[in-house]
Amino acid sequence: MEISHGWNQQESDFIRKKVIEHNMKNLPDEVKTPVEQMNFVLKGEGGALLGGLTATMFWQHLHVDFLWVDDRMRGQGQGSALLEQMEQTAKEKGCRLITLDTFSFQAPDFYKRNGYEVFGILEDHPKGFSQYFLQKRLEN
């Protein structure tokens, strides 16, 4: 037996498939929901992309992958509007929980102002900064 390293998409897909199979064997049917990718975008004149949010939904939970607002649009409530639209969609789809992570040089206070609670902090990652893990429970 040997261990090798590097990157191989086929091997990566196989490992992912096996972890998913294991998870599905161990979860009750009512929790098993299909993975759904979604995004919410803010467009300006001519369709220019000025902000957006990408998320992954599974197991009655939504994980915010990325949230970005153009520098010129920051401080105008656009990020909060994207979060609100995403939260409404999550509720409509039966999600019980939203999770995300952000770094100290990004926007932990923004998320806190929008009702998200810190449930974990990874100090000194990257070096000199912290990574915050936040959640928001939804009532359906």
Image: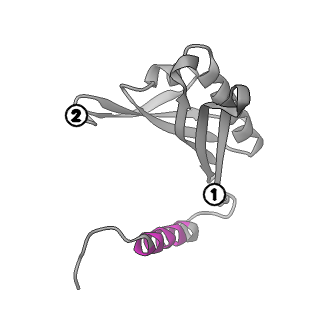
Residue under label 1, please give it: 35
Quarter in which the C terminus is drawn: top right
Camera-side residue of 54 and 50: 50
Magenta: main secondary structure equals helix
The residue segment tinted magenta is 10-23
Residue under label 2, please give it: 127
Mark 2 nearby-residue class (10 Å; few <14, some 14–19, many ≥20) = few
Residue 62 seen from this side: no
Q: Position of residue 19 (x, y in %)?
A: 47, 68
Circle 2: residue type: Lys
Name the residue at 50% across, 38% down.
Answer: 100
Q: Left or right: 20 with respect to 89?
A: left
Q: CA distance from mark 1 to mark 2?
A: 33 Å
Name the residue at 28% across, 29% down.
Answer: 129
Q: Is residue 92 magenta?
A: no
Disc with the residue nearer the chain's start (1 vs 2): 1
Which residue in the rendered view is the most extreme toward the front? 46
Residue 86 seen from this side: yes
Name the residue at 54% across, 27% down.
Answer: 116
Camera-side residue of 40 and 49: 49
Which residue in the rendered view is the most extreme toward the bottom? 1
